Image (cartoon, grey):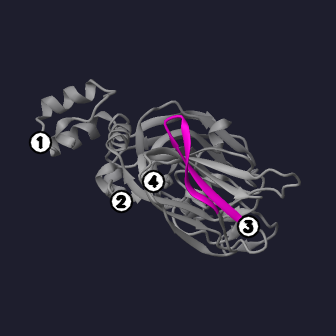
Amino acid sequence: MDFAALPDLASRRVGGSVLWANDELFAEKENLIRPTEAVYQPATFGHKGQIYDGWETRRRREPGVDQAVVRLGLPGVVRGIVVDTAFFTGNYPPFCWVEAAAVEGYPSPVELSEVDWQPLVPRSPLLGNTKNPFEVDDPQRYTHVRLTIDPDGGVARLRVHGTPVADPRLLDLASLDLAALANGASIDSCSNMFYSSPANLISPGFAAVMGEGWETARRRDDANDWVTVRLAGQGVVRLAELDTTHFKGNAPGWASLSGLVGDEWATLLPKTRLQPDTRHLFRLAGGAEVTHVRMDVYPDGGMARLRLHGALTDAGRRDLVLSWLNRLPVANVVTVMTEAGLSEADAVALAAARPLDDVPVVLR
C-alpha cells in the first residue's frame, strides 16, 4: 500500500469538504474526512443509538444504495483510496465503489449530480472494522469524488491519497510558495519520520498542534536529520520560513538550507540558530535557480512548517502548466482552450495530441 504515504487529498486538514450525502441518520457525513483516526467508546448512546465516529446510514427497506460526495481540498491525481470501516462490525456495507469528477468552479450538489463521473474503484467487497485499500490507475486530475455504499451501513473514514496538481490560472507564478503542497511541491526524501510525516511541513495552513508538524526520533549519534523537498517547479527562493511552533523542548537547535542547481547543491541559508515555538523568517540572497531544497536540522527535532517563497523560472512555469494541462480530462482541456481563444475544433485536436511538451501559445 505504497500510495498510503501520499497526501490525503480529501482530508479536512487540507480543505476537503463532504458536500452531500443522501442519508446520514445515525452518524454525520463530515466524519468521513476527519484527519484523525476513528475512535470508539462502547455503550455511548445518543437519541439515535450508539454513537459512531464515521458516516452511517439507516437500514434500507427498499432497493438502492447510499452515496456521499466529497470536494477534494487538493485537486490532483488519485493514486489510491482507503475505505476504512473501523469499529463498524455488524453494520458495515458489504460493497462499495468510488467515482471521480473534474469540475470547474464551485458547483452545488445538484449540479454535481449531472456531471460526468469516472470510475476509480469498481464495485468491490468490503470487510468490517478494516482499512480496505484500493489502488487507482488513472492519470487525470480530479476535483471531486463520490463514494457509493451498497446497500447501506457505516464507513469511518475515506482517504483519497494522491498527488496534488495546481491550477496555474489561480497562482501568481512570479510570487508563490515554491514548497507548498497545494502548488504541486512534494517531499522527495527524508532521514527520519518516526513521529510524523514530513509531508506535514508543506501542508496548507498553520499547524494546530505538535502532531501536525514533522518530528524525528532523538538522535544518539553525531549525524543530523534532514528532509528534501521537490519544488512546484524550478525557481528562485527569496524568503524562507522555518516554523517551530508548538515544538518547545524538542525544536532543532539549528537549521540550514541548500538548493539543487543541476547536479550540485548550493547553500541558500547557512547553519543558523533557531528558537523553540517560533516562526523564523529569513531573507535569502536569491539568484540560484533550484529544483529541490534540502533542509538540515541539527541535530534532530521537530518543525511545524517550511515555506519557501519566490518565483518560478521560465522552465518552472512551463513544467507547472504542462503538469496541469496534460492531466486534465478532455472536456476540461476543451473548456480551457476555447476560453483562451482557440476554436472548439482546434481545442479538441490539442487535447487529443497530449501529452504536450510545450505550452500552447495562447496560454503563455
Q: Amino acid at mark 1?
A: Gly
Q: Amino acid at mark 2?
A: Ser
Q: What residue is shown with label 4? A: 178
Along the viewing direction, whichever of 222 and 2 lies nearer the viewer: 222
Q: What residue is shown with label 1? A: 341
Residue 44 in sight: yes
Q: Secondary structure at mark 3?
A: loop
Q: Is residue 258 magenta?
A: yes
Tell me which label, 2 or 1, sits earlier in the chain. Answer: 2
Q: Amino acid at mark 3?
A: Gly
Closer to the eye: label 2 or 3? 3
Residues at marks 2 and 3, CA–CA distance in whole angstroms? 30 Å
Q: Amino acid at mark 4?
A: Leu
- Could you classify mark 1 by the number of other residues whose Cα lies within 10 Å: few (under 14), some (14-19), or many (20 or more)? few
Relative image position of residue 178 (x, y in whole percent) = 45, 53
Q: What residue is shown with label 3? A: 253
Q: Which residues are magenta?
A: 251-271
Q: What residue is shown with label 2? A: 175
